[in-house]
């Protein structure tokens, strides 16, 4: 696959992820790409109930690679949280730390279904 077709695939997929976020919103998280860079998303996620993170709202970034969805994103938390270093890529089974686990069928909302705080 040429680099331009990979880029087109990534753009199409990111647009589908944006549509999914807008048509199926959650009260637990929100994410959207930057206006000038579709590969750089910012998100907020609420701390899960019945955890030490309950009541918190955490801000972070999802950095999508140019060959997304074939490669996993990097996920960075920007809010101090006591679990992950701020402004460092975090290790999740669905992040670039574990590309062997990544499934291209997973959507852009996958990081929120597997909360970094659970």
Image: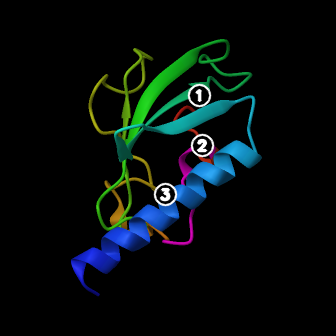
Q: CA distance from mark 2 to mark 1?
A: 8 Å
Q: Position of residue 56 (x, y in %)?
A: 60, 13
Give the mark nearest the N terminus, 2 or 1: 1
Give the mark nearest the N terminus, 1 or 3: 3
Can you say whether 68 is above or below 87 in the image? below
Disc number for residue 112:
2
Asked whether disc 2 touches disc 1, contact meaning CB atoms under 8 Å apart, the reply is: yes
Give the mark nearest the N terminus, 2 or 3: 3
Label 2: state its secondary structure.
Answer: helix
Disc number for residue 45:
1
Q: CA distance from mark 1 to mark 3?
A: 19 Å
Label 3: state its secondary structure.
Answer: helix
Circle 1 packing at 10 Å, graded few (<14), some (14-19), many (20+), is: many
Can you say whether 32 is above or below 10 in the image? above
Name which residue lies at 49% across and 71% down.
103
The quarter of the picture where residue 25 lies is: top right
Camera sees residue 118: no
Whether residue 52 is in magenta: the answer is no
The quarter of the picture where residue 36 lies is: top left
Q: Which residue is mark 3?
A: 14
Q: Nearer the viewer, residue 113 or 1?
A: 1
Q: Nearer the viewer, mark 1 or mark 3?
A: 3
Q: Position of residue 88 (x, y in %)?
A: 26, 32
């Amino acid at each position: 696959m040429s680099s331009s077709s990979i880029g087109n695939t990534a753009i199409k997929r990111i647009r589908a992820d944006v549509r999914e976020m807008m048509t199926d919103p959650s009260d637990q998280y929100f994410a959207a790409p930057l206006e000038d860079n579709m590969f750089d998303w910012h998100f907020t996620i609420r701390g899960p109930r019945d955890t030490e993170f309950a009541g918190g709202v955490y801000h972070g970034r999802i950095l999508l690679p140019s060959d997304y969805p074939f490669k996993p994103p990097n996920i960075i938390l920007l809010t101090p949280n006591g679990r992950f270093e701020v402004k460092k890529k975090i290790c999740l089974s669905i992040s670039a730390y574990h590309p062997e686990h990544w499934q291209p069928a997973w959507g852009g909302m996958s990081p929120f279904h597997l909360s970094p705080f659970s």
